[in-house]
Amino acid sequence: MTDVVRLELQGEIALITVNNPPVNALGHAVREGLLQAFQSAEADPQVRAVVLVCEGNTFIAGADIKEFGKPPQAPSLPEVIEVIEGSSKPSVAVIHGTALGGGLEVALGCHYRIARKDSKVGLPEVKLGLLPGAGGTQRLPRLAGVEKALDMIVSGTPISAAEAVEHSIVDELFEGDLRESGLAYARRMVEEGRAPRRTGEQTRGLEGADNEALIRAKHAEVAKRMPGLFSPLRCIAAVEAATKLPLAEGLKRERELFAECLNSPQRGALVHSFFAERQAGKINDLPSDVKPRPIKTAAVIGGGTMGVGIALSFANVGVPVKLLELNDEALQRGLQRARDTYAASVKRGSLTEDTMEKRLALITGVTDYAVLADADVVVEAVFEEMGVKQQVFEQLDAVCKPGAILASNTSSLDLNAIAAFTERPEDVVGLHFFSPANVMRLLEVVRGEKTSNEVLATAMAIGKQLKKVSVVVGVCDGFVGNRMVFQYGREAEFLLEEGATPQQVDGALRNFGMAMGPFAMRDLSGLDIGQAIRKRQRATLPAHLDFPTVSDKLCAAGMLGQKTGAGYYRYEPGNRTPLENPELAPMLEAASQEKGIERKALDEQYIVERCIFALVNEGAKILEEGIAQRSSDIDVIYLNGYGFPAFRGGPMFYADSVGLDTVLARVKELHARCGDWWKPAPLLEKLAAEGRTFTEWQAGQ
Ligand code: 3HC
Ligand code: NAI
């Protein structure tokens, strides 16, 4: 065998163990080891049944994603699974942790499957721009039926072991020791004289339903909910093949469709997104012996939009949290908002009443700072004014226990100045949540000049505890996400002055894949936020730069977005559908006229490049300044906080895939035509000249 796959005999049972940390991925050595182990068991006359089990935290979690795009090495996974399924001795896969992708496909190749009660199974390949390429699209529908198989393969979402039993994917659940449970099941198979039950020979799942109608319905759903994605349609085509072709031909068709996905640029971008998210958790200069402080209790200052969302985030993961407001009236408003948010989830069916009450019981409203003395972390989310922040941090400094983490949710103020209001700036860190804080996955962890390593590590651990995707950023105006989105929004609005409408700009960026257009987004968050930022920035803006003025005109007319019923769009009461705002057209005309611009039609590519390359150019400056550790961290921020399409990998990866020389050429053209907002970032110029990418670049090189 190989180092990663072991075969031992337990009487008449062959016990095959995979041990390839961290997730037992099916790299070349594992495939070869499995092949040899199953072949040996087949050849050994003493063996009457086979058990496949994994060490560590999980059953096989899939193909080795790092091997994608490299030259294939035999044996391929389909070959291995063919041998497993073809064996004349019954086999059982013993599932624990997560049997995902190729891991579930290996289990489906075995003749029986048992799963530990807390385990999950799934085919998440679609999330990587792929489809299950080792028989999953052919074998799963034969067991679970076409409807369930389509759901699992097209969504990529794993299901619980109990649900897998309901759908005949797993035969039995067990608790306790993996090896013992597997061996006991195998002995039973031998005693009962069970023959191999090959999944590929099953037909029950394919019968009795209107499979054509199910496939048509899934097509319609994908067209509506996953526009622009390459692999979901191929997932459906592969399952359709299972309904129409014999196994061998279906497998061949699956292979062809898998190769199409493997070669698609979307696969590269989605795999980048997967690793980028994992990489983001790593802090380059943090010594490995730094241990985070334990967090058992929390407090939040300010029960407004953000404070309540942050308090809910703690309660959602079982951490007791005190919510502090200025006075009882404001406090009751905040607590009611918390209850209303949970009640809406109960109404939607995503939360039970019982869980709601348990979580609400974890949130204690207070108005007195003294009771915060025992909090392990305090997150401040009061008004965005330095004077107010000062008052709050001075009080926290006075009452909080030594070692408490003092965090600010400020979105634009200088964290170093906030830290300086305390006698313990090393314990101060930024935890920049995104709205709604209880829903959005992104957390920018702002590292102040004096933030200690231990506090930074704790802030990252808090993010993990809250199930957020945390990214470390440095102190600057807007940190990473908002600093970049400011450039994007400004260019979008310049397009309005050149001749576009909000509908055209939003439409072009949605077609590019953005979850929402910039103007719909601004209407949602409120135009007054941008106005306040512009007011602050205008004070120091160099004379040769200016801002577009459409938003100022809307604000002056009291149109602040959804909350006032009109902004770039108009909204009917109680309805968020953006409709044309008839009062906007004269404002657009006026804005163009004031700058002597002749309005003209703009093409979609121009719109997209102008907005997206503005993000990229600013991202390059952020990288060079060391505000972000690596370009993939910027991608993670955009994918998780700003609705950037995962199939494009994030703005920096997208720029890499377009080619930095092409991006630079466009930036230079825009610089010549639109002025100094477009001054090319030195790092972009350097990398384009060297023929390198942002992804390859590391600070100091
Ligand atoms: N291949 C290679 N490395 C993998 C991997 C895989 N399939 N899955 C996880 N890893 C690595 C991660 O990069 C990470 O590495 P690092 O420590 O160096 O950063 C490490 O394993 C641990 O991963 P997580 O931090 O994600 O650990 P969690 O415990 O939070 O989650 C998991 C574990 C649920 C298994 C999660 O890692 C996951 O979802 N993995 C991807 C599963 C997947 O997509 N499988 C399908 C692959 S495609 C396929 O099988 C094609 C087939 O049909 C032919
Ligand atoms: P908000 O106006 O909805 O809430 C602020 C709350 O703080 C109010 O309820 C107010 O009564 C309370 N408050 C004010 N002074 C206080 C004090 N001294 N002690 C206790 N409570 C006090 O504001 P919002 O939107 O929740 O913003 C809060 C912070 O979060 C700001 O720093 C903002 O920049 C930041 N932020 C806001 C985001 C958003 O989308 N709204 C996103 C990310 C960060």
Image: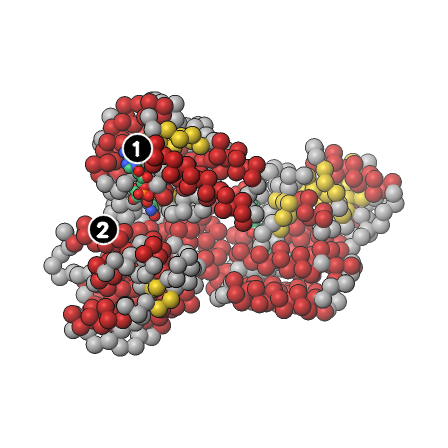
Q: Is residue 296 left or right of residue 243?
A: left
Counting from the top left corner in percent of width and height, residue 555 is at 24, 58
Q: Name the residue under label 1.
A: 326
Counting from the top left corner in percent of width and height, residue 695 is at 38, 54
Q: Which mark is residue 181?
A: none
Sort mark 2 into few (<14), some (14-19) or many (20+) by Cα contacts within 10 Å.
Answer: few
Front-lying residue, 172 or 344: 344
Instruction: Name the residue at 69% across, 61% down.
Output: 146
Front-lying residue, 70 or 464: 464
Is the shortest distance between ligand 2 and the CB of mark 2 under 8 Å?
no
Helix, strand or loop status at disc 2: helix
Is the shortest distance between ligand 2 and the CB of mark 1 under 8 Å?
yes
State the colouring used for the structure image.
secondary structure
The quarter of the picture where residue 141 lies is bottom right
Q: Is residue 478 left or right of residue 218?
A: left
The quarter of the picture where residue 338 lies is top left
The quarter of the picture where residue 191 lies is top right
Instruction: Name the residue at 42% across, 30% down.
Output: 364
Residue 279 appears in the figure? no
Q: Mark 2 points at which residue?
A: 532
Counting from the top left corner in percent of width and height, residue 424 is at 27, 27
Residue 580 appears in the figure? yes
Q: Which amino acid does label 1 sit on?
A: Leu
Instruction: Name the residue at 32% across, 56% down.
Output: 564
Q: Is residue 63 left or right of residue 379?
A: right
Q: Is residue 96 above or below residue 664?
A: above
Counting from the top left corner in percent of width and height, residue 313 is at 44, 39
Sort mark 1 into few (<14), some (14-19) or many (20+) by Cα contacts within 10 Å.
Answer: some
Front-lying residue, 520 or 582: 582
Q: Mark 2 or mark 1, which is nearer the start of the sequence?
A: 1
Q: Distance between the residues labelled 1 and 2?
A: 24 Å
